[in-house]
Amino acid sequence: MFVEEYESRPEFIAQERRIAIYQYFFEFLNVLAIVVLAVRFLRKPLLAFLDRQVAAIRGRIEKAASARREAEERKAAAEAKLEGLEAEKERVREQADELIELEAARIREATEHAIAQIVQETEERKHMELHHAAMQLKQELVTQAVDQLAERLKAEVGHSQQTALIEEFVRSLEGRRMSDPAESANG
């Protein structure tokens, strides 16, 4: 109660109002002092910082402009190359056609040579097989003749005469072989 009566007095209310005015006034003075001090002491560093930022932005703008100019020059060079590319493309196509024709002729020639070589080898092989077959046939005929002679000798002649006849037959065969040089060279 006492507190309520005291706070309701006009002197107390006036004092409260003065305190509030002083507080606002000193807060304003503090802010003003901070602003004045900031302007006074931070002005040069702040201006230097802003100048550096402006210079950096200008540098980026100049670099971008330089890059744009270079890109335009490259674009113009690329367009000029593109115009000459069609002629180069046609020239390359003609060279490729010529190379294809040359390679096709070379392949045909190699194929013909390979076929001729195969035909020649086939003929040689046929000749060799015929010669081999003839030699085998001769050998079989000689073997049959010897067998028949041996059988006949066994039936007609004794053992000592058989040996003498066989040796004579073998000598006569060797004599024939020696006298026929084409046969001995092939055999």
Image: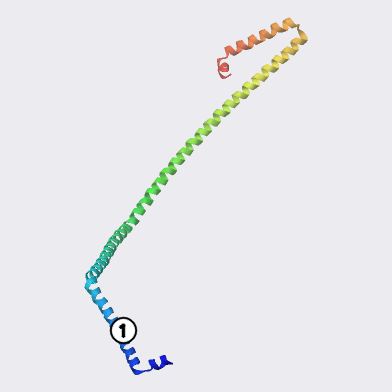
Structure colour scheme: rainbow
Q: Position of residue 82 (x, y in %)?
A: 33, 58
Look at mark 1 in the image and give the residue it sits on.
Answer: 23
Q: Residues within 10 Å of mark 1 (few under 14, many from 20)?
A: few
Direction from residue 151 to residue 50 in the image, left or right: left
Q: Residue at x 34, y 56 (%)?
A: 85
Q: Quadrant of residue 37?
A: bottom left
In the displayed structure, 112 sits above or below 147; it is below
Q: Decide which of 59, 170 is in the foreground and name it.
A: 59
In the displayed structure, 169 sits above or below 57; it is above
In the displayed structure, 92 sits above or below 149; it is below
Q: What residue occupies the far front of the structure in this picture?
A: 2
Q: Quadrant of residue 151?
A: top right
Q: Decide which of 114, 50 is in the foreground and name it.
A: 50
Q: Residue at x 43, y 42 (%)?
A: 105
Direction from residue 165 to residue 57 in the image, left or right: left
Q: Quadrant of the C terminus?
A: top right
Q: Quadrant of residue 2?
A: bottom left
Q: Quadrant of the N terminus?
A: bottom left
Q: Position of residue 79 (x, y in %)?
A: 31, 60
Q: Decide which of 83, 132 is in the foreground and name it.
A: 83
Q: Position of residue 18 (x, y in %)?
A: 30, 88
